[in-house]
């Protein structure tokens, strides 16, 4: 009986060891929980150009003054927050140690041609260049490889979605932006019908009619941060069905029946934007919708 127990114990230990060997990811070395410092020594203020290449998009950014612009595949003002996040996360990601230095293992960690290529320039020089591979065992840990190096390291404090965005999400989606407090009047026009919503002292009115405070507040909030859902990059001439004049800017709305969405253009730009119907209707109120009941 005693020999049987010993025999079974030995088998269990062997099975555990075998399971560990089978489950271990091939080509990986064990890494320390202790950080070896930042992967890159990046001077954020000096970064003036960024290149990112994913499986679906190759995009380039250039800093002009204090603002970032997309230069390829199109020329357009970039989403400043999204570009600055790239710089931030590259700067803070920590090196948790080398996991491999063998070229034949690059595909295992997806730090080969299937990875995301990222290059950050400082004062025109490509100082930081690496390939972002697959996620490790934590959602904020990824395998990366510096360009022109075989060393694969585990980087912590980084997220793939920061680098892998669609073109529309890299673009600046702002249509109109201001402080709510700076809006003193709004002119609405729907075909031959027009009316003006204006602030008098502390209350809003349309003509002699008092406006509903909550409704006005929702309109102001929507206008203050009015953003697009997508862009129209072809030439279109839609029929404008509504205009909103606010703070020296005119917003033109044209409804697309097929899309069930609005095209929107401002008097400051020739660009047409696509806006979800619900978002547009937060602004496009009729007189009876605004007057206090």
Image: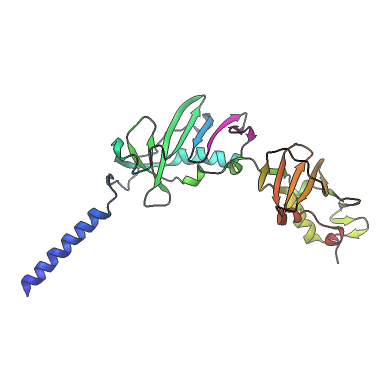
Viewport quadrant of the C terminus: bottom right
Judge whether 146 appears above or below 210 on screen: above
Is residue 117 visible in the rendered image? The answer is yes
Tell which residue pokes out farthest to the front in this image: 258
Camera-side residue of 120 and 116: 116
Residue 151: name its quadrant. Answer: top left
Residue 149 lies, with reference to residue 223, above or below; the image says above
Residue 16 image position (x, y, % from top left): 21, 60
Residue 236 sits in quarter: top right
Q: Residue at x 32, y 34 (%)?
A: 150
Q: Is residue 101 visible?
A: no
- Please give the name of the residue rendered at 32% of the width and 48% of the height, measured from the top-left corner: 33
* Left or right, residue 174 beside residue 48: right
Q: Residue at x 64, y 40 (%)?
A: 172
Where's residue 222, x and y in %? Answer: 73, 52
Instruction: Establish if 82 lies above or below 129.
Output: below
Region in magenta: 55-78
Q: Within the magenta stretch, is there residue 67?
A: yes
Asked if the magenta segment contains residue 45, the reply would be no
Q: Position of residue 153 (x, y in %)?
A: 34, 40
- The secondary structure that dominates the magenta segment is strand
Q: In screen coordinates, is 164 left or right of 200?
A: left
């Amino acid at each position: 009986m005693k020999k049987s127990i010993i025999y079974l114990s030995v088998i269990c230990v062997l099975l555990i060891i075998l399971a560990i060997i089978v489950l271990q990811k091939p080509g990986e070395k064990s890494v320390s929980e202790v950080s070896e410092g930042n992967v890159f020594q990046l001077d954020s203020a000096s970064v003036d150009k960024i290149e990112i290449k994913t499986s679906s998009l190759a995009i380039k950014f250039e800093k002009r003054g204090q603002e970032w612009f997309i230069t390829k595949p199109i020329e357009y003002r970039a989403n400043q927050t999204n570009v600055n996040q790239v710089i931030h996360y590259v700067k803070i990601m920590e090196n948790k140690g080398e996991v491999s230095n063998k070229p034949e293992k690059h595909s295992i960690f997806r730090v080969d041609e299937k990875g995301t290529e990222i290059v950050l320039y400082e004062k025109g020089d490509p100082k930081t260049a690496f390939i972002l591979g697959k996620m490790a065992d934590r959602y904020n840990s990824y395998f990366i490889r510096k360009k022109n190096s075989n060393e694969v390291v585990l980087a912590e404090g980084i997220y793939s979605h920061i680098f892998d965005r669609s073109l529309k999400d890299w673009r600046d989606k702002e249509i109109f932006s201001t402080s709510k407090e700076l809006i003193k009047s709004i002119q609405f026009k729907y075909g031959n019908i027009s009316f003006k919503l204006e602030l008098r002292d502390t209350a809003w009115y349309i003509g002699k009619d008092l406006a509903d405070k909550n409704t006005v507040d929702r309109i102001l909030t929507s206008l203050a941060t009015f953003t697009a859902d997508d862009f129209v990059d072809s030439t279109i001439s839609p029929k404008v069905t509504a205009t909103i004049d606010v703070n020296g800017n005119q917003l033109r709305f044209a409804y697309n029946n097929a899309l069930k969405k609005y095209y929107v253009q401002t008097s400051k730009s020739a660009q047409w934007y696509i806006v979800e119907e619900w978002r547009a209707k937060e602004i496009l109120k009729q007189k009876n919708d605004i007057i206090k009941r």
